[in-house]
């Protein structure tokens, strides 16, 4: 249940969303111009291969003028980088390689939250973040769930956990683009001097996601099976967008362990539908997927829920991992 009324109130108070914002709004354009002019002159006069102490100092000043923002986990960090561009400095609460559902935070992780202009999070996804944001982020807090258009209920097969709604919106490029647009607006509210830049970046991101959506729709148009058997129930929005039916082995969170009966039900579905591939993921132990595969003779393939990027990820960023996912889906589902 996103607090829609308070979100609206936040949008109506664009200049008060952090203690730093009013200061930055006055300071940034003036010093930004000085730094730019200085860098330009330094470029003209500095001999090649030599960085003057003055240029280095000016570069450091330019960095310190970046708008500081924090993302709760990778998909939101990628969005902030895409729509924020070089004018924002993005911090992430969930470190690479950590399964975000299980995130625990130390007081040290929270020390900078009150200095942020925007703290983007997904209410209900990471309880530790919800608590930290409520205590530390103040008006910088921005819950993306309203913009994400969360319409899917938890799959019936999953354990009845605290989350009754599927929150994995970023696996649908169209929903992901909508959140990008909302975040750009939020950045514009925090840093009005660069509003046009954020809006232009959001438009470019939306166009890139529309392109990705078309690639998925074409690639998954005609497949031998539409049953998508996955490790945890992260792919509901992707399945709904492209006419697939998700059959999750675990619940919405990977630590919701399936019962023996749920494993037997999934195995029965796999056999009945002639499913030949069980999809597992990078940050989660595949033991239950292996159990079902062994029982049914299906093979395992990697499908990444893009909850974090590590060396094991099949791509270096969201878009690359999604394209690797499409290739895995086309092979696993037998698409023409
Ligand atoms: Zn998940």
Image (cartoon, rainbow, N blue to C red):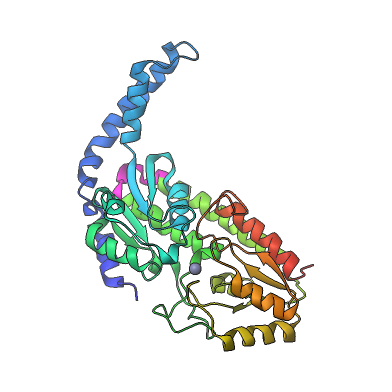
Task: From the top left corner, tell me how far across and down residue 64 is, in percent.
Answer: 31, 35
Is 106 displayed left or right of 329 in the figure? left
Quarter of the image where the C terminus is located: bottom right
Magenta stretch contains residue 194:
yes
Task: From the top left corner, tell me how far across and down residue 295 is, in percent.
Answer: 71, 80
Task: From the top left corner, tell me how far across and down residue 106 is, in percent.
Answer: 30, 56
Depth check: give the residue in front, 161 or 77: 161
The segment highlighted magenta reads 190-197
Q: Is residue 270 above or below residue 331?
A: below
Is 296 displayed left or right of 204 in the figure? right
Q: Is residue 103 above or below residue 275?
A: above
Tell me which residue sits at (31%, 71%) in the image. 4
Q: Is residue 40 above or below residue 259?
A: above
Task: From the top left corner, tell me how far across and down residue 138 is, in percent.
Answer: 22, 58
The quarter of the picture where residue 327 lies is bottom right
Quarter of the image where the N terminus is located: bottom left
Tell me which residue sits at (72%, 64%) in the image. 219
Is 209 displayed left or right of 269 in the figure? left
Depth check: give the residue in front, 280 or 247: 280
Tell me which residue sits at (55%, 64%) in the image. 305
Judge whether residue 126 can be spotted in this image: yes
Judge whether residue 230 can be spotted in this image: no
């Amino acid at each position: 249940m996103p607090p829609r009324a308070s979100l609206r109130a936040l949008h109506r108070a664009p200049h008060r969303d952090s203690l730093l914002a009013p200061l930055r709004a006055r300071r940034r354009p003036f010093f930004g111009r000085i730094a730019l002019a200085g860098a330009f002159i330094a470029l003209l006069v500095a001999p090649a291969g030599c960085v003057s102490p003055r240029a280095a100092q000016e570069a450091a000043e330019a960095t310190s003028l970046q708008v500081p923002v924090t993302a709760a986990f990778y998909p939101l960090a990628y969005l902030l980088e895409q729509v924020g561009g070089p004018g924002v400095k993005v911090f992430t609460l969930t470190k690479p390689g950590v399964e975000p559902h299980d995130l625990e935070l130390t007081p040290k992780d929270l020390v900078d939250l009150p200095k942020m202009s925007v703290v983007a999070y997904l209410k209900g996804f990471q309880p530790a973040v919800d608590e930290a944001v409520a205590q530390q982020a103040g008006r910088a807090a921005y819950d993306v769930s309203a913009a994400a258009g969360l319409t899917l209920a938890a799959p019936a097969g999953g354990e009845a956990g605290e989350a009754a709604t599927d929150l994995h919106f970023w696996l649908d490029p169209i929903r992901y683009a909508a959140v990008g647009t909302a975040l750009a607006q939020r950045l514009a509210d925090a840093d009005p001097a660069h509003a046009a830049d954020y809006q232009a970046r959001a438009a470019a991101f939306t166009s890139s996601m529309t392109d990705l959506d078309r690639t998925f729709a074409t690639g998954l148009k005609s497949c031998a099976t539409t049953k998508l058997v996955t490790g945890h129930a992260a792919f509901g929005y992707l399945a709904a967008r492209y006419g697939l039916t998700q059959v999750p082995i675990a619940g919405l969170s990977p630590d919701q362990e399936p019962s023996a009966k749920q494993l037997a039900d999934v195995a029965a579905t796999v056999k009945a539908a002639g499913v030949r591939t069980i999809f597992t993921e990078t940050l989660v132990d595949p033991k239950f997927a292996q159990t079902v595969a062994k029982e049914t003779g299906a093979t395992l393939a990697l499908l990444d829920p893009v909850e974090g990027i590590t060396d094991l990820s099949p791509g270096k960023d969201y878009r690359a991992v999604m394209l690797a996912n499409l290739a895995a889906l086309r092979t696993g589902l037998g698409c023409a």
